[in-house]
Amino acid sequence: MRQSRYVLVALLSAFTAEGFAQPLQYPLSEKVDVTDSYFGVTVPDPYRWLEDDTSRAVAGWVASQNEVTFEYLSRIPFREKLKNRLEQIFNYPKYSTPVRKGKYYVFSKNDGLQNQAVYYIQEGLGGTPTVLLDPNTWSEDGTIKLASLDLSRDGKYLAYSISRAGSDWREFFIMEVESRTLLPDHIQWAKFSGAAWHEDGFFYSKYDPPADTSKALSAKNENHKVYYHKIGTPQRDDILVFEDKDNPLRFHGVSVTEDGRFAILSISDRGRGKNGNAIFVRDVKKGEKSFKPLVNQFDNTIRVIDNIDGKLLVKTNTGAPNERVVLIDPAKPEEKHWKVILPEKDHLLEGVTAAGGKLLATYLKDVSHRAYVYSLNGKLEHELSLPTLGTVSFSGGRRDDNVIFYTFTSFTFPTSIYKFDIGNKQAELFRQSEVSFVPEDFETKQVFFPSKDGTRVPMFITHKKGVQLDGNNPTLLYGYGGFNVSQRPSFNSLVIALLEQGVVYCVVNLRGGGEYGKSWHQAGTVLQKQNVFDDFIAAGEWLIANKYTAANKLAMQGGSNGGLLVGAVMCQRPDLFKVALPAVGVMDMLRYHTFTIGWNWKPDYGSSEDSVQFHALYKYSPLHNLRDGVSYPATLVTTANRDDRVVPAHSYKFAATLQEKHRGDNPVLIRVETKSGHGASNTTKQIATTADIYSFLLYNLGVQAQWP
């Protein structure tokens, strides 16, 4: 490895507890002579060596960066008090909605600061809850995490999977529920899979183990297979149900209808840039041994809701960008034979589930839910009354349920659970969160602003009541803008700590998300990805023009695809923001598809393997658009050394390049969490990471934060 050595030094106002300024010296980052050629364009990659996450050199670099970062953070005078306030706010019981399996109801509860929620089981709604599964007992540091939990239809067996230190790799275990006996079954190398119970076993999806298991976190994932595991047998005896060697980048997953009649195989081809999925079915009742196509295409999404008398009820955007529900006869699956149950409306049909012999549907109108109960033939029976603009989530249920549960949440409305009686169409509060804050002290409003091309973009703004629009408020702008994900109103107790300090918290609904259906998503993908950044920039400019804040008081935050957003925007408009907080971001847009599951993102990003798409990617790729001599915002890059979804090399290379090119007084640092993945692996790490991010944010916005 040919190396050139240099030391990066920046003189910053990094204050000790005594208030004396000290120079901040960034760690040494070595460069190598590596280049790639894309359609005649030579692209240097001097920090390629940081992609080897198992090397000693990279471990040393991470340790050195963390040393500088944590030394800087330790000098922020209110950091510990902020962490204490976050713990206080987060310390309240958090419940999931009850779900019925056989004679049992199962739900989770976190007493407050437990690293993971504990799962409880009870007979009937009036039964006494007892512990079914407590993941907090699995490891002393709380980094072995429950990833999925699936009870068999009769409630006799529990299949659960674990994640170690935040990895996407999964291991399955089986428990006999009545006795709480852990069976010898142990399944490894599962990924992107739950357990779909069928008869005396379940379907699951996995990859073959990497040739070098020590490099499992960075191994490229190909040839997703579906297996059937029979209870009481070793994994080596599991039956291969489906694989497609000719298409190694496809995803395959099997689900089973509630009555057990149909096994449903869903296939997506995102590795080829397709944004939909195909559905194949197997009628088990008729003894079918192979899957037959129901909808064999990859340009539209389709999801089976339930089996209705041998016909499949599905939600799809085929011929309906805002989604609809149709009934498909497997014997006549052609679209001309589909029976429309819920026709497409002007607003996005975001969620549909079947329970209690009804269809429960949520429509998204200007990023806020409306919730309805329909008969199975599509007749409207009831609209749920909701407390305010917010988000509804139905827990699902069984056909013979008399009650169903749903949650409601909004920015200053803690997540609450409601029970809906199907017979009398009455909803009542079942459980309400009690958080250490006064909701009436804050307010949320929704605004709309024009983007660069005139597109009307929505944004939610939350702040203390009585805020003065004098252009001097510290403001945090959060965005995502990708993968058809909607940024709906939701409660995050940790944000309260910022609101209490006078921060204006803004969530912008960028193109690329799913807020307005398929067209809104596509308008922020591939060759139109710049629209996402334009929307975000326009949001910041609107906040300044309307006197909420000023450029020296404005911060931006985003994670994963949102980390890409922050990275791209700080390259394009470093003057617009004082602070940048990119978390686990996709920063190398030319090589992202070569890591683990990165090829799966081609429908949103395109690929540098295509000449036209390469030039679009190269134009905004954060890693490749940092410029020499520019004063960038105060930046805290955050990632984790066990992230095998957006591998930490993205953040490592971006941080090294930023420290090389940045000139100015703003600190540009990276914080690398250990034993975590694409998100905190437990509550302790979540609060610690948030405390550091918020401390950096407030300190660099000049907020004189105070807590008792």
Image (spheres, rainbow, N blue to C red):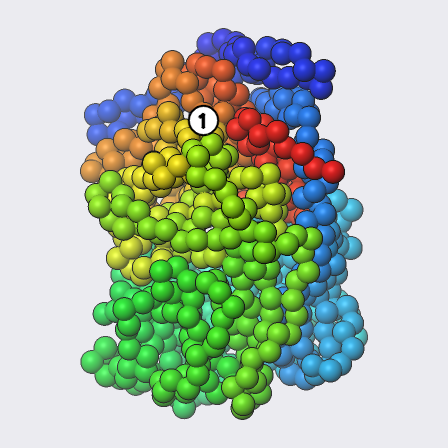
Q: Is residue 223 left or right of residue 189?
A: left
Amino acid type, mark 1: Asn
What residue is drawn where x is 49% and y is 71%? 386
Q: Is residue 458 left or right of residue 285?
A: left
- The residue beneath circle 1 is 552
What residue is drawn where x is 61% and y is 43%? 500
- The image quadrant of residue 516 is bottom left
Q: Position of residue 313 (x, y in %)?
A: 38, 80
Q: Position of residue 447 (x, y in %)?
A: 37, 51
Quarter in which the C terminus is drawn: top right
What residue is drawn where x is 58% and y is 87%? 402
Q: How many marks?
A: 1
Q: Nearer the viewer, residue 480 or 304?
A: 480
Q: Position of residue 585 (x, y in %)?
A: 46, 38
Q: Is residue 458 left or right of residue 701?
A: left
- The image quadrant of residue 674 is top right
**Does residue 528 appear in the picture of this structure?**
yes
Tell me if residue 541 comes above or below residue 493 in the rendering.
Answer: above
Q: Nearer the viewer, residue 197 or 244?
A: 197
